[in-house]
Image: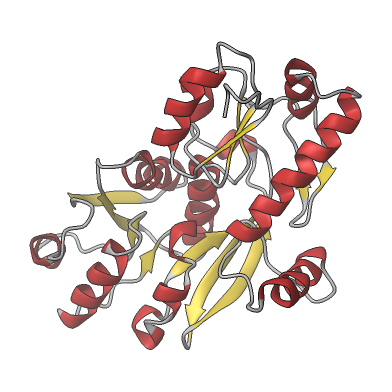
Amino acid sequence: MIDAGAKIMITPCDADPSISAGQLTQPLGIPTLTLCGSAPVLTAAVGDVMFGTYPADNVQATAVANFAIAEGKKKVYLLTSPDSTYTANLPEYFGKVFEKKGGAVVGRGTFTMGQPDFSAEITNIKNLADQPDLIMTAAYEPDFPAFIQQLRGADVTVPVYGADAIGTPTVKGLGKLVDGVVYTAAGYAEPGSKLQAFNAAFAKYAGHAPESTYEVNGYEIGLILDQAVKTAGSDDPKAIRDAIAGLKDFDGITGKITYAGTDRMPLRPVALMRYEGGEGKHIQTMIPDAADVPAP
């Protein structure tokens, strides 16, 4: 794509391929935007051409931790995997905010992505002398469904919180098994909102409703680039990069998006959701206080 003359690059969600692509785009000054890539380390790992577009892991974790404290949760067990930046770091960001707000981390466990058996981790949880009143993990498919099925099968009723990667049809399809599970999204379609209108237009075009907020994230990338090119007044990559970096309170579909004054991971709303009766119910939408967000 670079050889063909690409002046903008859009990369996958995960930090690892986005960072790899950034090693090629950074020396050439090509602005690079990751679709739903949320690891806050990726912009620094690449350089000034790399932009996140989705709520960062540490921002999502802060929103979930603040909610957990508000709900009266005191003790958390963190379940992580070293196999991706997302699964390794997001629960730890949660733990930092949770402890800062007066909570305690009473245990930690790890898993390998793709493992079918979580019995050892579940046994560790059941045997903790100081039982948690919350389990926090960034596990996603197929790991999260396997974990929650085995956890509930072992009669462990501790609430489980996660993040955006479990707002999917597969997890929703688990029905009552995931009742009480809290997760995040980039927005919520309030009646009369731009997001509700987008979802309706998407369904008409695609023949089915959006499966997550990743679809609207992709659309918002187009809007961000459109505004950046208008501001730059050209298709020069450096001018576009500078215009993106200067965006402030840009009216997206999910709410206002700001890059100005950030490390190119946007300040933007986080919607908190909870599965109830097999449906994702909106709890609240917030932009966490920047002072509460832990450093990458």
Q: Residue furthest top?
A: 27
Q: Whole-percent x and y of residue 123?
A: 9, 65
Which residue is rendered at x = 48% and y = 27% of the image?
A: 21
Which residue is rendered at x = 21% and y = 73% of the image?
A: 151
Asked if residue 7 lies left or right of residue 126, the reply is: right
Q: In the figure, 224 relative to 212: above or below?
A: above
Q: How many marks?
A: 0
Which residue is rendered at x = 42% and y = 27% of the image?
A: 20
Residue 295 is at least partly visible in this image = no
In the rendered image, which quarter is residue 95 located in?
A: top left
What colouring method underlies this structural image? secondary structure
Which residue is rendered at x = 74% and y = 45% of the image?
A: 222
Q: Whole-percent x and y of residue 212?
A: 57, 66
In the rendered image, which quarter is residue 100 located in?
A: top left
Q: In the figure, 176 relative to 56: above or below?
A: below
Q: Nearer the viewer, residue 293 or 103?
A: 293
Q: In the figure, 119 relative to 25: above or below?
A: below
Q: Nearer the viewer, residue 55 or 131?
A: 55
Q: Whole-percent x and y of residue 12?
A: 50, 43
Asked if residue 161 lies left or right of residue 292, the reply is: left
Q: Whole-percent x and y of residue 72?
A: 45, 64
Residue 22 is at least partly visible in this image = yes
Q: Nearer the viewer, residue 50 or 285?
A: 50
Q: Look at the image and tell me in which quarter the N terminus lies.
A: top right
Q: In the figure, 189 relative to 2: above or below?
A: below
Asked if residue 288 lies left or right of residue 134, the reply is: right
